[in-house]
Amino acid sequence: MILKYDLSKENTELCELAPEEEIYYCLPLDIDLKGNFRQNSYTVMTNRRILILEEGELTKEYLIEQCDAIRSEPRIACGILYLEKDGKQILLGRFSAKHLTRYSYLFRGMQIFKQGRTDHVVSNEYEHSCPKCGRALPGTKECPRCAGKKDGMMHTLLTLMKAHIGRLAVILFLMFLATVVTLANPLIQRYLVDDVLLRETKDYSEALWCLGLMFVMSAGIVFINAGKSFLCAKLGAHVGEDLREQLFTKIQQLSLSFIGDRSPGELMNRILHDTARIKDFFANMFCNMFTVVIMFVVLCIYMLVLNWKLAILAFVFAPLTVILSMAWRKNIQKRFRLQWVKSDKVNSNLQDVISGMAVVKSYGQEYREAEHFGETTDELARIQRSNEVFFAIFYPILSFLLGVGIYLITYFGGKNVIVGSMTPGELLQFINYTSMLYNYVNWISGMPRSLMNLATSLERVGDVMKQEPTIVNHEDAVEHEIEGEITFKNASFGYKSYQPVIEDVNLTVHKGEMIGLVGASGTGKSTLINLVMHLYEVDDGQILVDGIDIRKIKLENYHSQIGVVLQENFLFAGTIYNNIRFAKPDATYEEIIQAAKMANAHDFICSLPDGYNTYVGEKGYNLSGGERQRIAIARAMLNNPRLLILDEATASLDTESEYLIQKAIGRLTEGRTTFAIAHRLSTLKDANRLVVIDGHKIAEVGTHEELLAKKGIYYGLVQAQLKVKL
């Protein structure tokens, strides 16, 4: 990937490129060593040299072949760049934190240029311009501001309603019918007063007909609204169900990096509570929204035709309420966002405490956790109280303004009746329409609260839905039956690209070989097996499976051929039978029993009162650690994996459990390519090779005896463990 910035002609001349030398990286060095911002300063990397340009002048120059590495590290609101040369660190400069990711490519670029390679570089520019606003953009063709307009609330709502267009059409028809019937009732009232009750010759039968028609229309409104509410409730239920399923499916598809950045409580809030609020909007607000808008427009037109002077007087108060509502719109939105953030915090805290209740009780911290939870809920309650008090004051003020309008209409309309320019029936009709208008204005003024609630939930749901998984099936991905050869080729990776965890790893693991991964905590052992499991993808280099790039193998096909046994294996709340069957949902009862026997789990399962139908409880805590581990091994054995991952599979177990599990693992690893991590080095003595990771790189490779004879890092680790045992 090219990371270029345009250099001025003068700066290009300062670089004085040699023949066959080309600029590959050019990044801003926009902060000086005193912390001041500056311009026209760059870090330039060619395929031969590193050049530092400061305010238009070439100040430093280094040949890549004479340097060990170039690194960037994050600091508070900035990053620093330094060079490793002859065992020393040379500070090159500082840059804004927004460039950290880009600077991470310099290390990889140097390693590749030192090897004389350019295979990672493509011809496209890293920077583009948005076709709509012309802004320069890193790594995208449309700026978030312009792209965001397509993902607004209305766009999201329309997308949700597409799947329910038939039900929506019936609801809209009922809304239109309700509008017609509601507007017709005051017309009949006017006719009853002016043409029946005030007529010199009274016709009581005609009055009864008018009253009967008014009753039928009133009853009709009730049935129409009931049908409309019923259909809206069904629409809301279906929308909520669809959203929950889509969100859950989306979260399942997203990469672990996304899941790790968010707490379980927050994600649960979005799946359950946010979708519930969207469902409530469709069930309650939506069924009246279009009716109110249609009625509002029709009433305004009809009132102007009926008496434009009184209509203008009535309209004066309506805009005041709308203006007040719009003026406080942003304030209302902030209130709801803050309330939901605090709600996420409460849910996350609750989820953590309930999950870790054994630890809480072990340390006798129930009171402290209750106090902490109380503080968190008090903060949420304070924000909720503040919001409710605001709305309790805000809406009565709007209602009062509208009430003043009714009194003025009655006063001036009554004067018109007295002078004869208006009939009593017309005044009654106009007052009814004004009351309706103000009721709708009052209803509309309350919409910002519901809409902001809806917008906040849609935003939070959309935040998940618009995420793209970083690991997906490539267009040319194929199904492949794994034989077992795994090759790391110049592999580098960091959970944050500017903080590499493993760098330039080269390793070939042969079919059926057991590899033990050894090293201090934080050196990258678990990261290495995460890459083998294709839970993450390398930032640079390749991982080959039987000579095929791991990215070219279909994810489902690849993962179905992997078995995993971890130190803390997760068991789902359910039966032992279902937990073992999880690896192969179509497994027969005989296959499950056979897997349990191979894992040395069958005997203890049969000793339980309900056998394989025993309910294991949340995370399997009804079982001992050794029993959970053997069930996990049975689960791994069930689908006959070609590739096996063991991460501290025998840690923290008693001697008897460890013996049974070691025997089970021995059966499990036979003939399978295996990656095993263990801090207890004695458990890895039988591995074909041990790989020692140190300083984010492979430091040593060999058998147990070979590495002991070298008296290097592995020898030191073994000696340290022997001293601990003594």
Image (tube, rainbow, N blue to C red):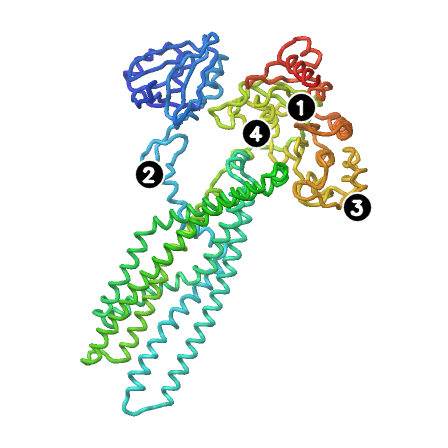
First in residue order: circle 1 vs circle 4: 4
Q: Can residue 376 be seen in this snapshot?
A: yes
Secondary structure found at label 4: helix
Q: CA distance from mark 3 to mark 1?
A: 34 Å
Q: From the image, state whether disc 3 or disc 4 is nearer to you.
A: 3
Mark found first going from the N terminus, 2 or 3: 2
Residue found farthest to the left: 419
Q: Which mark is residue 132?
A: 2
Q: Reading the chain from its start, which is encountered first: label 4 or label 2?
A: 2
Instruction: Give, as a three-letter code, the residue at label 3.
Output: Pro
Q: Which mark is residue 551?
A: 4
Front tag of 1 and 4: 1
Tag 2: amino acid: Lys
Image quadrant in which you'd find residue 46: top left
> Is residue 125 in view?
no
Q: Position of residue 719 (x, y in %)?
A: 67, 13
**Viewer-side residue, 395 vs 161:** 395
Q: Residue at x 23, y 66 (%)?
A: 312
Identity of the amino acid at label 4? Arg
Task: Kindly identify which residue carries mark 3.
Answer: 609
The quadrant the C terminus occupies is: top right
Q: CA distance from mark 1 to mark 4?
A: 28 Å
Counting residues from the start of the chain, the first of labels 3 and 1 encountered is 3
Q: Is residue 285 left or right of residue 136?
A: right
Q: Which residue is mark 1?
A: 678
* Secondary structure type for disc 3: loop
- Three-letter code for the amino acid on which mark 1 is drawn: Ala
Question: Which of pointers 2 and 1 lies earlier in the amino acid sequence?
Answer: 2
Disc 2 to disc 3, how far (Cα)?
69 Å
Label 2 CA crowd tier, 10 Å (few <14, some 14–19, many 20+) = few
Label 4 crowd (10 A; few <14 / some 14-19 / many >=20): many
